[in-house]
């Protein structure tokens, strides 16, 4: 049985979601998983039942920004409007992932949503010589890339090393595709920084500090590069592998997935 990966619809804007969601679905399916779309229009009860049937969570990007009130900050003039429906579903997914120790991958807005939910804060608008966001007028087909430095002694570092068959160095530099104007600032509870932009130090990835909970958040968009980039493919393969392991542990525990104690998982 293929692992089921819960993916919320990226945004209340139907056009944006129709354009971006297929990349996440394709990346999950190419890695051997089943993508389970979580609509933003469901009731909490309906969403919870669908989430309960999944083995892992993928929080995708969004054109919205997390409401700065959630982390006690005044709104920056360039901060986009929040998407209350997406925030609501994210909170349900995050609660389920942490309660059940389900694997979780956050991408772009997804890692920001995760960090704020864990009481962290965000840089509301990056001012840097490094291009992180797509400049106006640049076609969406053109990738915006820069270098990021990953800590090798991390879950993400091991994923990178395995994809490149490269071990030994304390840090490894990779090329990432970027499409964001915000980033993690103060890291949330139970998270740690594992990658930064090489030239300006912007946080590019975090992961969970608990060894028994697979939790990775990246600021870039690996779902857009799975066809040409080994690291991007490896991230999704690792997520699906962790989801398969979680499913087997839950099944072996012989209980309903929603009520299996953490220590059994």
Image (cartoon, rainbow, N blue to C red):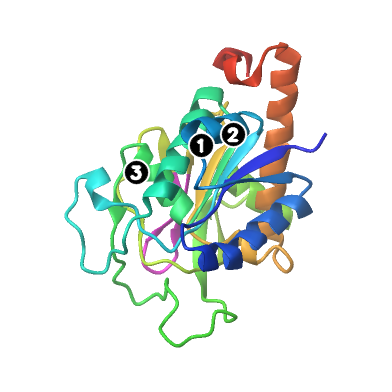
Q: What is the secondary structure assignment of the residue under circle 3?
A: helix
Q: Nearer the viewer, mark 2 or mark 3?
A: 2
- In front: 214, or 100? 100
Instruction: Provide the secondary structure element on which disc 2 rests.
Output: helix
The circle on residue 2 is none
Q: CA separation, marks 3 and 1? A: 14 Å
Neighbours of disc 1 within 10 Å: few (<14), some (14-19), many (20+): many
Query: Residue 187: image x %, image y %?
Result: 34, 43
Q: Is residue 106 left or right of residue 122?
A: right
Q: Which residue is mark 2?
A: 51
Range drawn in magenta? 193-206
Residue 56 vs 84, above or below: the answer is above
> What percent of the width, then of the height, locates residue 115?
38, 44
153 drawn magenta: no
Residue drawn where x is 48% and y is 86% of the image: 138
Q: Position of residue 147 (x, y in %)?
A: 51, 68
Q: Which residue is mark 1?
A: 93
Q: Which residue is mark 3?
A: 116
Q: Are marks 1 and 2 in contact (CB under 8 Å)?
A: yes
**Residue shown at the point (59%, 34%) measured from the top left:** 51
Tag count in the figure?
A: 3
Q: Going from the N terminus, do you reach mark 2 or mark 3 first? A: 2
Q: Residue at left 55%, top 52%?
A: 9
First-in-chain label (1 vs 2):
2
């Amino acid at each position: 049985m293929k692992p089921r990966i819960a993916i919320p619809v990226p945004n209340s804007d139907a056009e944006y979601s129709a354009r971006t969601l297929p990349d996440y679905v394709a990346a999950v399916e190419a890695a051997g998983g089943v993508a389970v779309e979580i609509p933003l229009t469901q009731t909490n009860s309906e969403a919870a039942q669908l989430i309960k049937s999944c083995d892992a969570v993928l929080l995708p990007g969004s054109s919205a920004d997390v409401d700065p009130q959630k982390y006690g900050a005044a709104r920056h003039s360039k901060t986009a409007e929040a998407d209350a429906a997406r925030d609501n579903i994210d909170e349900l997914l995050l609660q389920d992932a942490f309660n059940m120790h389900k694997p979780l991958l956050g991408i772009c807005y997804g890692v920001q949503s995760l960090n704020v939910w864990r009481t962290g804060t965000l840089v509301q608008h990056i001012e840097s010589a490094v291009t992180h966001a797509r400049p106006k007028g640049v076609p969406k087909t053109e990738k915006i890339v820069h270098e990021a430095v990953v800590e090798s002694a991390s879950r993400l570092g091991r994923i990178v090393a395995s994809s490149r068959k490269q071990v030994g160095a304390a840090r490894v530099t990779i090329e990432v595709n970027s499409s964001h104007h915000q980033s993690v600032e103060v890291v949330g509870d139970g998270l740690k920084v594992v990658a930064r932009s090489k030239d300006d130090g912007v946080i590019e990835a975090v992961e969970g500090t608990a060894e028994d909970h697979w939790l990775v958040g990246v600021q870039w968009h690996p779902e857009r590069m799975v066809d040409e980039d080994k690291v991007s493919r490896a991230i999704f393969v690792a997520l699906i592998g962790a989801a398969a392991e979680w499913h087997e542990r839950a099944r072996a525990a012989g209980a309903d997935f929603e009520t299996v104690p953490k220590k059994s998982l």
